[in-house]
Amino acid sequence: MSERKKPEASPLDAAVLETPDDVFHAIDEDAARAGGEWKQPEGYEGSIARTMFDTASSADGTVTILMPNEHIDRLPSQALVRIESRPDKRTYLGAVVEGPFSEPDGLRADATPMVVSTVQGGLLMPKHHGRAQVALIGERLGAAVVPPRRRPKPNSPVFVLDARETADVLRIHGNLRLGLADGFDDLVVSVPADQKSVFPRHLGVLGTTGGGKSTTVSGLVAKTQKEGMAIVLIDTEGEYCAINEPTQDPQMIEALARRGLKPVGVANTHVYHLVGRETANPAHPSLSTFSLRFSELSPYAVQEILDLSDAQSERFFKAFDVTKLAIEKAGIWPKSDDDRRRLMELDEQETGYPEMALAHLYDIVKEIAWFIDHDDATPDPYLETAAFRSKRKEIRLVMGAASLPKNVISWRALLGKLGKIKRLNIFDSSNAPRLDYEAMLKPGRVSVLDLSDTDSPQINNLVIAQLLRGVQDQQDENYQSAVRAKQRPTPTTVFIEEAHEFLSAHRIAQMPVLFQQVARIARRGRKRWLGLVFITQLPQHLPDEVLGLINNWILHKIGDANVVNRLRRSIGGIDESLWRHLPALASGQAVVTFTSQARPLLVGIDPTPCRLLMNQ
């Protein structure tokens, strides 16, 4: 078998394979004479992107930046950047609001070669770059950041800010941690709860069911308690009645561990429930019953909450006036000169009549109904108030002098509505005290009002109306005492769950007095370290008047486009990109904007460390 000969190399192959070394030496020498290896110009070192020329679609306040492929992952959404506009020597700060997107070099992403290759399963991966849209936050002048009056010049270097610089620019430092900025592993978002200009300003926590509101609220309660605030939480579902215990949810425990946090219950927690009603957590170590005091409620607020007709309202106020005179005739109140001076200063738009019980008013309405529609055979009605029974003649003289409407049907309808709430035995009970507001507003105390067993928006609204009034009066007293002692008063925060039940647009139209009370509390509270937190899963029911009271927002997932559009008109400063995110937020994500922040942020709220009854 003959030996096979190797093919001879062609002259062209030899030329390519055997390039003389002196050729490469010559290239190196030319490069050295030209300045050596290419380096970025002075001032561009460390930059990750460049500003692009403006186009017909460019918008004021934003610039487009381009970056090499290897830098795309260094610039997540919401990242802050510094733009050094070299020609005019100006420094701008901005935030990534769109992107970064990957685009092929030299071809449009939808160019025919790209589409054909992708559809046919090809492995074409051309060189590509990143593009992002940056909203300008301001222009840096020394240590100050002022609104930008100009735009960065094209081809200006863009530098990404680290976590510390980002926190400084966004002003997200503080002693009350909310969570982590979305897209970052180490950018903690906090607010300064010890600043009067921040937390006493009222907060709205909005979102659909399952969006994470309960986690947010319980986490806020736990953290504000540690900061020494006094917390009052109106719990309409009973889910916060076990926050004194650490969470038992395995998923929550795992989520806490990922952030270096541990399950822990809220200290100094006390649960209150109405007399005659059950609590969602009978095993709580600090349980107290309470009853409402009719004398602490404005008659105008009661009339609105009971939803009385015009005829019933007229009779209600007539009966209220007669009851005041009957109380005086019976020697119940006033009893002293101090009482009479207090009577001269009484504002029934704000509060009720001292010492007047619901039973007093009910007795008088019953007596009036008998008085205007009886004959000689009709027996006297039974009056629960012994002092009224002994002064029946004097009280009837008062009735005779009053111009009482004669239609007994409306009187009996009013008697029925008063009897309905009277039979609940939640007013003026001898078996349960009134709420002790002085104890509730101690530093670090958490008071949970469990209304889960009332099953009545009317009762809840009566409780909330009295609670807000009592908290305001006590905070006023605490504030004055602190001022005299030259100390800072204890900050107090009231969380109102299902706020739409109490302050819906429909109810506001029918309850102007009640809303004015809330508005006065909201306005005065800001000056006295009293903040309100409105929590609802139906923000569409909150009227514009309530939205106007709120300065800080935590917005969880809201899928209704109409609601989002309405909030967009009410809440300023939130980027369009964040509004687009709102309907698709995952549970625990929220758009957060506080008065202390430089701009709103998408935040992964910290998992709750405490136990929620509805979730476990």
Image (cartoon, rainbow, N blue to C red):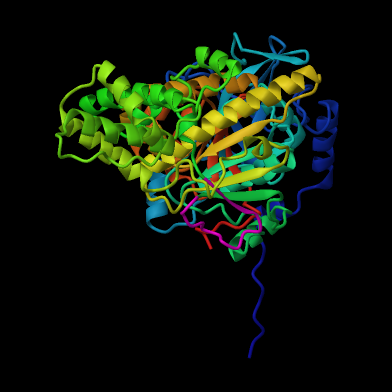
Residue drawn at x 80%, y 47% is 20
Residue drawn at x 43%, y 18% is 56
Q: Main secondary structure of the magenta part?
A: loop
Q: Quadrant of residue 256?
A: bottom right
Residue 25, position as x, y percentages in the image: 85, 40
Q: Quadrant of residue 87?
A: top right
Q: Quadrant of residue 485?
A: top right
Query: Residue lying furthest bottom in this view?
Result: 1
Q: Nearer the viewer, residue 168 or 455?
A: 455
Q: Nearer the viewer, residue 295 or 111?
A: 295
Q: Is residue 350 left or right of residue 23?
A: left
Quick check: 47 above or below 109?
above
282 magenta-colored: yes
The quarter of the rendered structure image containing the N terminus is bottom right
Residue drawn at x 64%, y 55% is 610
Residue drawn at x 59%, y 31% is 471
Q: Is residue 411 visible?
A: yes
Residue 583, position as x, y percentages in the image: 42, 42
Q: Nearer the viewer, residue 23 or 259?
A: 259
Quick check: 311 above or below 276?
above
**Bounds of the magenta segment:** 275-290
Residue 80, position as x, y percentages in the image: 65, 30
329 magenta-colored: no
Q: Nearer the viewer, residue 488 or 169?
A: 488
Q: Is residue 157 visible?
A: no
Residue 399, position as x, y percentages in the image: 28, 22
Quick check: 305 above or below 259?
above
Q: How many numbered badges does the structure rendering display?
A: 0
